[in-house]
Each structure stands twice: as structure tokens, then as C-alpha cells.
Amino acid sequence: MTSSAFPAARMPVAVIGAGAIGRMHLERMLAHPDIAPAAVADPGEGVRAYAERIGVPWFADYRDMLERTPLGAAIVATPNHTHADVGLACIARKLPVLMEKPVTDTVAQGRTLCDAAEAAGVPLMVGHQRRHNPILRSARQLIADGAVGKPVSVTAMATWLKPDTYFEPLWRRQAGGGPVLINLIHDIDLLRFLIGEIESVQAMTSNAVRGYEVEDTAGVLMRFACGAVAVLAVSDATVAPWNWDLAAGEAAHYAQLDVNSHHISGTEGSLTLPRLEVWRYAGRSGWHEPLTQTRTPVHRADPYVEQMRHLRAVAEGRETPVCSGLDGLRTLEAALAVHEAARLQRTVVL
Ligand SMILES: NC(=O)c1ccc[n+]([C@@H]2O[C@H](COP(=O)([O-])OP(=O)(O)OC[C@H]3O[C@@H](n4cnc5c(N)ncnc54)[C@H](O)[C@@H]3O)[C@@H](O)[C@H]2O)c1
């Protein structure tokens, strides 16, 4: 069934995979003006009871759900290695998809998924929700307006602590389930959104704190097509406030902290995120001259809620994806290059 059958009422949307992020989506959908939770598909323990509690029809098998439920779109929030199969099943039914990031866990699968979506004329979006955050949109506008001149140097930090319980699902302890593909990928996407395409990557990873197969820490260097160079530090095993989620207060369950996580320096000035401070010379330039700081006020809004408004608009053909399948694929390529560069101990050119 196509979305045009739901012009005015809330668009019925399914959530496939009702774990941590799937439930965040469902809870927002319950109160969303544009879309409504029409079904949940997840065979996991306790999901049926959860679905009953929130009053949404439950299915163990998403194929069964797709067969039996009229839908305008689907949000796929299953583990990374299932994204390709689940996405292809939705696309085969002409169902617009918001795929949680990473779009898939391999580039080949990502290409297959993007090709299938294009061939079917079905919108495929990737859940890099930061692109819907007003702070990031303001930062992008500031850069486009010349606030930093030509971007030259970037530092980004993604350091925080995941509790032990986070690692109970096996896939989070295995290769691909760690902070590079789960978290740093958002920072990579953020930087692509602000600065443009990434040309090459160097990296080191470490699992020295937890000793799981998956990394808990990485140091990454990236060179952008525009010539800018970024230094990124990521760890989910540190007690630290310097990460976008806490600094931007990305969602209500993060205690918002008044710190910066990203610094972008250019030929004319520097920009911090998420505080949006711009540092420039008021008069003459030079490292002995005084720098002035201005701060751009920005309203705060929940990017997941805005992403849902956008999902419906894209499904109805009123907007083009802010983060398309291909965008998600390019971001994935750069994130996978982090693992590859660390493994090969050399620069990976994209
Ligand atoms: N955008 C974000 O900020 C964000 C945040 C967290 C997770 N994610 C992404 O969302 C996805 C899920 O992550 P999570 O942390 O919620 O994982 P999770 O393990 O908490 O939940 C995954 C759920 O999927 C279910 N599932 C597994 N296979 C399924 C299948 N074939 N059909 C239906 N359900 C199935 C599991 O039973 C589980 O309930 C991952 O791809 C992750 O990278 C995105």
C-alpha cells in the first residue's frame, strides 16, 4: 500500500526491531503528529508484552507483518548484519524505509540495498539523526556563510562510558558492534555534512579496557577532499563528557552538559560544536592579535522527532532525503575504512 492512501491522518509506520533505539522511535511515534506506530515486528524476549503495553500490534516475523499490515513506511532498527535483508524485503513491497545506521554492515550490501531502492523507485533514508538537529543545521549554515573561511583543521571527540549491561547482547561484543560503527559513524556523517567528502583515513584501534573482540577505543585521522584534516578520538570505555550526545543533549535521556565536542578551524575563523562559538579576529590577523568570540543562539529540538516528520514527507514525495541511502553508504565506507586502516596499519584511500 502506498503512502498516498494516508494524506491527512497520521501515516501508519512499522518498527522492525524493538530494542534500545526501536523503542525510542516507538515512544516518539506514540505522540507524533505526522506518523503513528502501526505494528512492531521483533521475535525478541519481552517484545510482545512491550507492544501490548503500548497498544501496538506485534508480529514475531517482519515478513508476516509486511504481508498483513497496511503501511506508509517502515523504520528498521534491527542489528546491523540484518539491515540488508530486512531493507530488501521492505523495498520489494515498495515501502519507504528509514534504515537505522549503519545502512548495512558491508559496502557491498549497502550498494545492493541502494540499487534495489533506486530500481524500485522507493525512498531509502538512513538514520543519521544529527542532520535533523537545529544545532548542526546552524553550524552548516555558518560554514556556508564563511564563518571559518576554508575549513582546514578539525578535532572531534566521542568519549563516554557504556555500562556493562550494554554488552549483554553478543553482537555488541563482536566485530562491527563497537563504537566505530555504532557511534563514531555519526561523527563521520556529521563531518561529511559540514565539510564534504572524505578522501583518506588512518587509524589505530584498541580493546585494551574490556578485551572483547570489538574495539573500545580508536584514534583516527581523516583527510577531506577540500584538503582539511580531522583528528578524531573515540572511546566508550572512558569517564568523559566530550561527545555530541551529551554536549548537544541529543535526546531527553542524555544529561546535557555545557561542553564542546567538535572544533572546526579555518582560514578565517573557528567554530565549536555544539555551543556554536565562532572565534575570529576583529581587526588585524595574527597569533599576537586578540580573538573575539560570538555565540549563535539556537533553539533546541529533538532530532528524532524531526526525522519522523521528514520520513513522512519523503514517503509522500514532498521532500528528498536529508540522509539518503547513498549518503549513508559513503559514511559507512569511511567508517569501515577506520577498521581497515587500523588492521593494515596504513592509509586507506576512499
Ligand atoms: N541512530 C542512533 O543514534 C542509533 C542508536 C542506537 C542504535 N542504532 C542502530 O539501531 C540498530 C539497533 O540497535 P539497538 O541498540 O537498538 O540494538 P538492540 O540489540 O537493543 O535491539 C535490536 C532488536 O532487534 C531485534 N531483532 C533482531 N533480529 C531481528 C529480525 N530479524 N526481525 C525483527 N527484529 C529483530 C532484537 O530482538 C532486538 O530487540 C543498530 O543498527 C544500531 O546501529 C542507532
Image: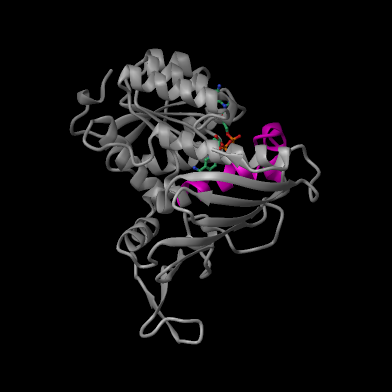
Coordinates of residue 106 in the picture (x, y in percent): 57, 28
Coordinates of residue 193 in the picture (x, y in percent): 41, 49
Q: Residue at x 34, y 27 (%)?
A: 73
Q: Residue at x 28, y 43 (%)?
A: 33
The answer to whether residue 243 is seen in the rendering is yes
**Residue 347: which quarter of the image?**
top right
Q: How many numbered dots are placed on residues in this image?
A: 0
Please determine whether, in this image, residue 166 is positioned above or below residue 81. Answer: below
Coordinates of residue 168 in the picture (x, y in percent): 71, 38
Q: Quadrant of ligand 1?
A: top right
Query: Is residue 315 or residue 283 the one in the foreground?
Result: 283
The C terminus: image quadrant: top right
Please determine whether, in this image, residue 242 is positioned above or below residue 78. Answer: below
Query: Is residue 83 or residue 166 the one in the foreground?
Result: 83
Please tell me whether residue 184 belongs to the stretch shown in magenta.
yes
Please determine whether, in this image, residue 62 is positioned above or below residue 26. Answer: above
Q: Residue at x 47, y 20 (%)?
A: 112
Q: Main secondary structure of the magenta part?
A: helix
**Residue 311: which quarter of the image?**
top left
Coordinates of residue 204 in the picture (x, y in percent): 71, 48
Please tell me whether residue 155 belongs to the stretch shown in magenta.
no
Residue 162 lies left or right of residue 271; in this view the side is right
Identify the colour scheme used.
Answer: one colour
Where does the magenta region start and end?
165-190
Query: Is residue 18 or residue 154 the one in the foreground?
Result: 154
